[in-house]
Every structure is written in structure tokens, then in C-alpha cells.
Amino acid sequence: MSNMRSMPYGRGRAEGIPRGLDAMEPGPALAAILASIDVDEISGYDRIVVLRAHQRMASHYQAHIYADMSSVVDAMADEGDDEPWAAASAAAEIRVALRLTRRAADSEVALALDLHRRLPEVHAGLVAGVIDVRRAKIIAGATAHVSDAAAAAVAAQALADAPRLTTGQLAALIRRLAVAVDPEDARNRFELAVEQRRLVTEADASGTAHLLGLDLPPDRVSAARARIDRLARQLKTKDEARSMDQLRADVFLDLLAGKAVGEGARVGGVEIRVDLETLAGLSEHPGELAGYGPVIADIARRVADQQHHARWRYTVTDPDSGMPVATGITRRRPTASQRRHVEALHPTCVFPGCRMPARGCDLDHRIPWAEGGPTTVDSLGPLCRHDHVVRHAARWRYRRLPNGDHVWTTRLGHTYTTSGLPP
């Protein structure tokens, strides 16, 4: 065990598992092979392969569980129950059989029917083990408001990328696709939600309270968050004992109470990514608001046109390739042109799965500066502080591809490709 933990960086697979295990489809053959493997006897590299194989099997079996649940609903319908009562009767049967709460049983049956009737391709993805239940639930939930035809189109596009995305990235992708597939519906839902914006206070069991602003315009939320974050960072001196989360919460309350905080007259920064056609009003493609995700075209254009009360960084992209063609800033002198260029090329942390906006990241030398790595745009990549530490401490390596993607190699020797653009 100890030798495996300290194995040299990038060491390949050791003998101990069948070749091709990482590509085997889930089913009885894979299950039999996995049952014969003792993970304590294989290399660290192979343990990741086995982990992924077990996840495919878990997804495969979960798909069958949902198919079983749907079949119970069908059985109730065959007994003469109408549609709503068939689902309710089935949920009661399943609730007792699996020892679920009523709410959990209702939720599981609803998802089972959704996968069986509205999103069969998502169910097929579960059967094949290419996605897991977490991703299936995200696709189902994020497409619930669109038509069945639109949901099928969004799901088909999302499934192509789902295996390589985190759940957060997948949710952002589906929001963008749902806006793109029906911009008019997205605008109507946005306007209706903003009309219902409200402030809510809640008591917590610990004796504390929650203060929530709901259904607010995302551009204003991003600007407010950026200002709170900047003021909190100003207060984080070596003598300050409060954490950044505590400081942000205190700044939030101080500002609402009218108390001066730091350089309160200064403004925060917000970044927007939008393509040329949308900026010119020729299309309704969604924009990308850093730290928030997809926004409807109207919000993207509003942010790009903003000239007051805040500093706006923008990146204009080619609508076909998605690559940056222009960057700018509406107020204040920009940071060094090098950082601006890197942030435009890579709008988020380039570590696999991370969505931290690049403006809040360190600039990492792919070839460490101490080893002679040059300080050039092509050799720099944004990494959030946590992933920057992990990258060096765990000895991960990465290289940039001509299309802006990055290929990462982990300490155990596995490789992952991250996109240079938001998912």
C-alpha cells in the first residue's frame, strides 16, 4: 500500500485488472469481473478504473430500478386506475416496499415516469452507464419547463457532453441550451420571475436568521456580490480573525444598514461573455455572466451597454467558434494586458470541473517559473487558489491544445481534457 501511494508521477497501469475494463459496458460480464477484483491488490491507477466501472454498474442498475417503478405505474393503469391515481397508487406500493418516505416515493416515481416517457434517451444513458443518477436528475429537472420536443433536443445535446462535465457545469449547459432552444419562452419566464422578486426572512433552528432576496436580476446580483467580495477582501488584513465568509456576511449587513464599509464609494467588477450576433441584436443566444452562468440575451446586452455605477469587463466572442475576438472594460484602467488576455481566453479556472471565474484566480505557469517557465500569455492559465495548490502539491501536469482546451495528467497517470470555453 505505502509503495503504491508513493509511486512515481505518471506511472501507467500495473497488471492486475483485465485490459479494456475502462471501456466495458455495464452488465453481467462486467459485474462478474468486478466481483473478482481485490482493490487492495492493484495499483492506484487501476483503482480509478475500477471505481469508474463500479459507477457504470450502479447507474445501470439504477436505470433498471426506475424502469421497474414505471412498470408498477403501468400495472396500476392496467388495473383500471386513471393516470394520476395510477402514479399515486404505485408510489404507495413502492414507498412501503422500499421503506421510503412519502415525499421520496413520490419524487422517485415522478422521475421514473419522466425518464420512461419524456426523456427515454436519458434513461438509455443511465442503462449504458454513460451518466449517473445525479446527472439524470439535473437533465430532467432543468428541462421540466420546456415542451417535450424542446426537452428532447436539449437532452440530446446535453448527453453528448454530460460524461465529461461536473453536475454544476452540466446544469449551466442545460440552462444555456434551454434558453437557446426557445428564447421567447426564456424571456417571458425571466420577466415573470423578476416581477415576483421579493425579500424573505427565515428563522433557523440554531437561533440565527436568513435574509434572502429571491428572483432578482442576475446582473445586479453579480454586481452586488462582486462589491461585497471586494470590500471583504479589503478588510482581510493579517490582524483580521474573521474568515472570508464571515467578512462577506458582515459587509452585506453593514451595507444594508447604511454603515460605511471600507472604500464604500468604489464599485465592484462584473464580467460578461457574449457573441457578436447577440450583441448586435441579430440573435438571441444566451450570454455567460461570470460566477452566475447563462443569462438571456437581453441581460447580456444590458450588461455590455452598462456605463454607470460599476466596472464591467466584457469578452465578445465569435458566434461560430466561441473564441474571443475583443475584450474591454467600461470603467477604470484595466489590469495588466497579459492578465486580461489570459482571462479572455480562459474565463474560468482551467482545473478539471472548476467554475471559479478567472478574475478571482491565480495565474499559473504551466512550466513553473522556478524551472525556467516563461511569463507569456501562452504559458499562463488561471487556477483558483485551491486548485493551484493541488496542482503543485499533488504534482499534476497540464498542457494547452491549439483550440484552447487543456489536457491534464493526474499523479496516478490518468488524463482528462477540459474545455477552454464555458460548458
Image (cartoon, rainbow, N blue to C red):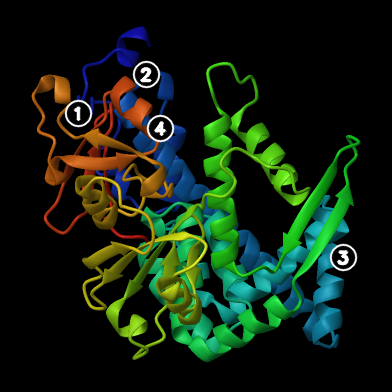
Which of marks 3 and 2 precedes in the sequence?
2
The residue drawn where x is 19% and y is 28% is 12
Secondary structure found at label 4: helix
Residue in view at x 26 percent, y 51 percent? 340
Left/right of residue 137 with respect to residue 413 in the rendered view: right
Q: Nearer the viewer, mark 3 or mark 4?
A: 4
Which residue occupies the foreground of this view, 25 or 323?
323
Q: Residue 34: x and y, percent?
A: 43, 37
Q: Nearer the viewer, mark 4 or mark 2?
A: 4
* SS label for mark 2: helix
Rounded to the nearest whole Å, what is the CA distance between mark 4 and mark 2? 35 Å
Q: Quadrant of residue 160?
A: bottom left
Q: Identify the residue position indicated by label 2 in the image.
A: 41
For mark 3, what is the residue? Answer: 92
Query: What kind of residue is marked 3?
Result: Ala
Of residues 208 and 326, the one nearer the viewer is 326
Mark 1 or mark 4, earlier in chain: 1
Instruction: Identify residue for label 1.
Output: 12
